[in-house]
Image (cartoon, rainbow, N blue to C red):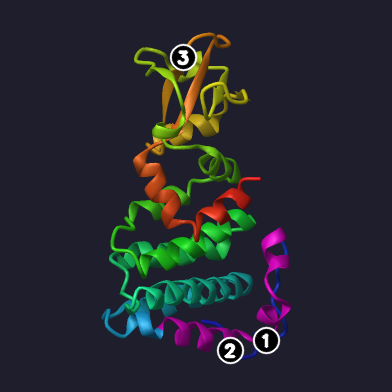
Amino acid sequence: MTKPSDNDGLDVAGFGKIAKAIPPKVYERSATTLLTAFEQITAPITETTGGLGRYLRQKFDNMVEAEKAIATYTIEKAISRAREKTQLAGRALQPPASSKSFVRAIEEASKETDPLLHEMWANLIASELTDETCHPHFVEVLSHFSPAEARLLILLVPLTEVGENDGGYFSASDDAFKYWMSKAGGELNPWSISCVLLQEFRFADLVAPKGSKPEHTAILFRTALGTAFLSAVSTSSKEQDSAGK
């Protein structure tokens, strides 16, 4: 349990770019103030969900000071985005479909040091409060993402946009490929473990380029599941484009 005396400033060592991106005033809050802010922010969500509020407080208490600051900052951002989305649709915030995945998302976001992945966590938390199709499995998958997988998924396009192709590789293993492209005749990129992982998550799949092509090359495209995930962790297609650059 954090004590009121723990207010001499928050240690942000090791949190890198994301720590620098958060406004200094966030870190100037005492631990007690952070807890109060966290409870006020989450109150509209937890009022109708039984013991979720107590569970969130226990998880918050167990975080180190820098994690508490980042968790509060993330929740503020996520709820602001969720409210904006629901107001446009004439709806109210909804309790998360899965309390377990909602708490897990907050915990993971409080530890995330990469700015792009942190944005994805904030957007995913917002999606859990606004979108009934936001599956709890997305929290599990995002926790396994590195920035490389995030940027690769943003670069991919659906199968309908890849252009002419000869169909799928039905017998080739992942070790058979040396290059991938996102569209027929597009830029060649080195095959990587990120390509394999996105296939493992079923966020990406392969088809063979049509006609003349370098040996061991595949078109890597984003599946419907990958598009649903990207929608849940993004605020807009414009943000996806800028994040992938």
User: Marks 2 and 1, how far apart in space?
Assistant: 9 Å
Do the numbered discs 2 and 1 sit on residues whose CB atoms are within 8 Å?
yes
- Mark 3 — residue? 210
Question: Is 115 on the left or on the right of 204, as rendered?
Answer: right
State yes or no: residue 33 in magenta: yes
Q: Nearer the viewer, residue 73 or 127?
A: 127
Q: Nearer the viewer, residue 200 or 216?
A: 216
User: Marks 3 and 2, how far apart in space?
Assistant: 60 Å
Residue 159: give x, y in percent of width and height: 40, 32
For residue 7, the mark is: 1
- Mark 2 — residue? 33
Q: Is residue 242 above or below residue 25?
A: above
Which residue shows up at 42% across the image and 62% down it? 104
- How packed mark 2 is, by other alpha carbons closer than 10 Å (few <14, some 14-19, many 20 or more), is few
- How packed mark 1 is, by other alpha carbons closer than 10 Å (few <14, some 14-19, many 20 or more), is some
The mark that comes first in sequence, 3 or 1, is 1
The mark that comes first in sequence, 3 or 2, is 2
Question: Is 142 on the left or on the right of 185, as rendered?
Answer: left
What kind of residue is marked 3? Lys
